[in-house]
Image (tube, rainbow, N blue to C red):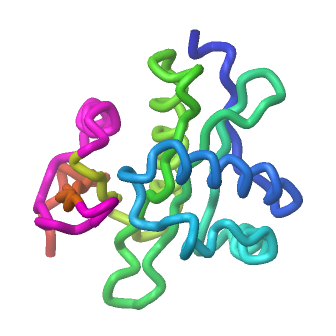
Amino acid sequence: MAEFFNVRILRPEEAPALVALRREALESCPQAFASSLDDDRGLSIEYMQEAMSKTAQMTVFGLFDGGTLTGMTGLFREPKSKACHKAHIWGMYVRPGVRRRGGGMRLLNAAIDHARSWSGVVQVHLSVSESARAAQALYQRAGFVEWGREPRALRWQGEFLDERHLVLDLCPDETPA
């Protein structure tokens, strides 16, 4: 049940646990991520510690079942002045043993709520591989809508996968200027 899950921002000193979970995600669901074990900078503890210390630009959330890190997602804000109204969710992963219990939605909602706290952010973007059907359903339940599809965005073991691009409008009642 979701009430047993705790979601919070991960601290730089928790980078080793995050990197271990990221490695697990890339190994168990390679078609769901654009990065691979060979090229993912998120597998460097030092890189993640540095990135996690820059909370004005990027935040990483952890899903805990008891005291165990069982899920993660990242959120970053576009740094350029013409694009800083956008935030992006990346690296969403929940261990199979705790899926379908509400933790993924709690994790996603924490990231969305945090994006709302960043002044000027009006939309949240993410991309999802066509192979990640459960993730697509989760994002749609959260209100994300598809705005485009990139054919053959990823190639894994000789097979191509399309990637869907989704957006969540944080200010649906406002008319864009």
Answer whether residue 124 is magenta in the image. Answer: no
Q: Quadrant of residue 148?
A: bottom left
Q: Quadrant of residue 160?
A: bottom left
Q: Nearer the viewer, residue 129 or 175?
A: 129
Residue 78 lies, in percent from the top left, at 43, 78
Which residue lies most toward the top here? 1
* On screen, residue 10 above or below 78: above
Which residue lies most toward the bottom here? 81
Q: Is residue 169 left or right of residue 33?
A: left
Residue 20 lies, in percent from the top left, at 73, 51
Could you tell me which residue is drawn at 49 percent across and 48 percent down? 92
Q: Is residue 5 left or right of residue 46?
A: left
Residue 89 lies, in percent from the top left, at 44, 57
Could you tell me which residue is drawn at 36 percent across and 70 percent down? 86
Magenta extent: 131-158
Residue 52 lies, in percent from the top left, at 72, 67
Q: Is residue 113 left or right of residue 129?
A: right
Quarter holding the C terminus?
bottom left
Could you tell me which residue is drawn at 45 percent across and 45 percent down? 29
Quarter holding the N terminus?
top right
Could you tell me which residue is drawn at 44 percent across and 52 percent down? 30
* On screen, residue 105 above or below 77: above
Answer whether residue 151 is magenta in the image. Answer: yes
